[in-house]
């Protein structure tokens, strides 16, 4: 019988800054005296999808999750940092609203996700990994996805107190599965850590933040942006629906990719679990979470559609970055893992 042992929680270290904004945020968190965060003009001029703004946002959002070593928990609600976060969020959100079309209803946006391409999709990361992916690419994919999967379901939990009736009951039922249905060894974040261990990766929370590109940070930050604002509860439900609707077929391809590459059983199990669980979740989330929300608050239809399409927009940007680098035979990470092109270290 396998005995699950709870590991000791240790907050990650602050990531290395990538520009003036993230440098000022890190300094503000580490300095225990009064310190002014960066000027708002810096945030307003920053690339909304760039490394500096996205890392600054990631750092500020992580204060609401596991925090950082050397940063007092009280800094989570520092009004100066919240003011800066608002400015960064508005820059990010305004860019998304400008770049994401608003010509579909929630039903239409979700229906588009249900259409699977015929044959191989050259623009899909999971299609690439299933047919052509190499083990080093699967390891990179796991490393960058760890920023989300090691806290899987946490950002979506923020919407629960903002839902009612059928939508709330269905959301809690799905989240219960995500959190292991009462069994700590079955928590999906734990299963992903097991996947990483099978691939010879470090399993500590937030370990790979310095290595991941801005496109991955933006995809992770989107959940926190939606989750921390009641006004964006419809968008968070749209994001959640998008994840659940697309998860089962994508997970099947990734499980096949891991089998083909000879990854261990724990690595395969994570995606095998999502093939089965999310096939059921997809039905529940469309019928009861989205349906229940819009039955109670029909005015949120456009927000749900925005959440669906913003998720797809950022995932497409990340996928294009990964596939472009991989097809050129180079690492998509800022710091290549051992065994990847550009690394001097052999794979573990």
Image (spheres, rainbow, N blue to C red):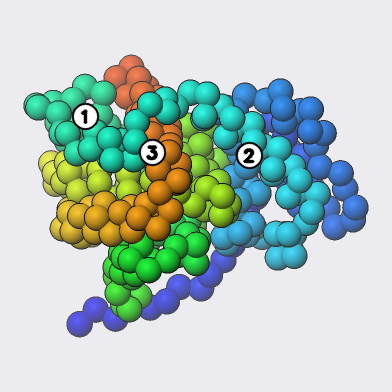
Q: Residue at x 24, y 78 (%)?
A: 2
> Callout 2: few (<14), some (14-19), or many (20+) C-alpha neighbours within 10 Å?
many
Residues marked 1 and 2 touching at CB (< 8 Å): no
Find the distance from the CA under tag 1 to the CA under tag 3.
28 Å
Residue shown at 55% from the left, 40% from the top: 210
Cα distance in 3D space between marks 1 and 2: 33 Å
| Residue at 24% from the left image edge and 55% from the top image edge | 287
- Residue 307, image x and y in percent? 42, 41
Q: CA distance from mark 3 to mark 2?
A: 19 Å
Q: Residue 222 appears at what percent x and percent y?
A: 50, 42
Quadrant of res 53: top right
Badge 1: residue crowd in 10 Å (few <14, some 14–19, many ≥20): many
Side of 17 relative to 95 (left or right): right
Q: Secondary structure at mark 2?
A: helix
Position of 224 with respect to 242 (left or right) is right
Residue at the far top in the pictured view:
328
Give the numbered dot on residue 89.
Answer: 2
Q: Which mark is residue 128?
A: 1
Instruction: Tell me the tag on residue 305.
Output: 3
Please state which of the two labelled residues, at mark 1 or mark 3, is closer to the viewer: 3
View extreme (right): residue: 34
Circle 3: element type: helix
Residue beneath the point at 52% across and 43% down:
221
Q: Nearer the viewer, residue 80 or 307?
A: 307
* Residue 244 in view here: yes
Left or right of residue 105, residue 83 in this image:
right
Dot 1 or dot 3, earlier in sequence: 1
The answer to whether the residues at label 3 and label 2 have Cβ atoms under 8 Å apart is: no
């Amino acid at each position: 019988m396998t005995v699950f042992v709870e590991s000791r929680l240790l907050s990650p270290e602050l990531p290395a800054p990538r520009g003036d904004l993230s440098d000022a945020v890190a300094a503000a968190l580490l300095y225990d005296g009064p310190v002014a965060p960066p000027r708002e003009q810096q945030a307003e001029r920053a690339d909304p999808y760039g490394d500096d703004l996205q890392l600054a946002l990631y750092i500020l959002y992580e204060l609401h999750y596991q925090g950082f070593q050397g940063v007092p928990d009280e800094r989570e609600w520092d009004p100066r940092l919240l003011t800066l976060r608002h400015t960064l969020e508005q820059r990010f959100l305004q860019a998304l609203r400008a770049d994401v079309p608003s010509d579909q209803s929630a039903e239409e946006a979700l229906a588009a996700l249900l259409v699977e391409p015929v044959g191989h999709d050259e623009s899909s990361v999971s299609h690439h990994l299933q047919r052509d992916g190499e083990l080093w690419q699967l390891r990179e994919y796991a490393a960058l996805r760890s920023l989300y999967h090691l806290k899987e379901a946490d950002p979506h939990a923020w919407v629960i107190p903002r839902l009612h009736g059928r939508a709330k009951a269905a959301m809690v039922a799905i989240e219960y599965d995500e959190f292991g249905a009462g069994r700590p060894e079955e928590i999906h974040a734990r299963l992903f850590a097991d996947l990483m261990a099978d691939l010879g990766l470090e399993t500590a929370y937030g370990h790979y933040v310095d290595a991941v590109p801005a496109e991955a940070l933006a995809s992770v930050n989107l959940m926190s942006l939606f989750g921390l604002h009641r006004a964006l509860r419809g968008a968070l439900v749209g994001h959640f629906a998008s994840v659940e609707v697309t998860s089962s077929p994508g997970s099947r391809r990734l499980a096949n990719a891991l089998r083909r590459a000879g990854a261990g059983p724990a690595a395969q199990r994570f995606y095998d679990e999502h093939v089965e669980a999310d096939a059921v979740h997809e039905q529940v989330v469309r019928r009861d979470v989205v349906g229940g929300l819009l039955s109670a608050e029909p005015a949120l239809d456009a927000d749900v559609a925005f959440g669906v399409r913003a998720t797809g927009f950022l995932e497409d940007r990340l996928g294009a970055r990964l596939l472009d680098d991989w097809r050129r035979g180079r690492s998509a990470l800022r710091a290549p893992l051992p065994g990847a092109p550009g690394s001097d270290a052999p794979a573990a």
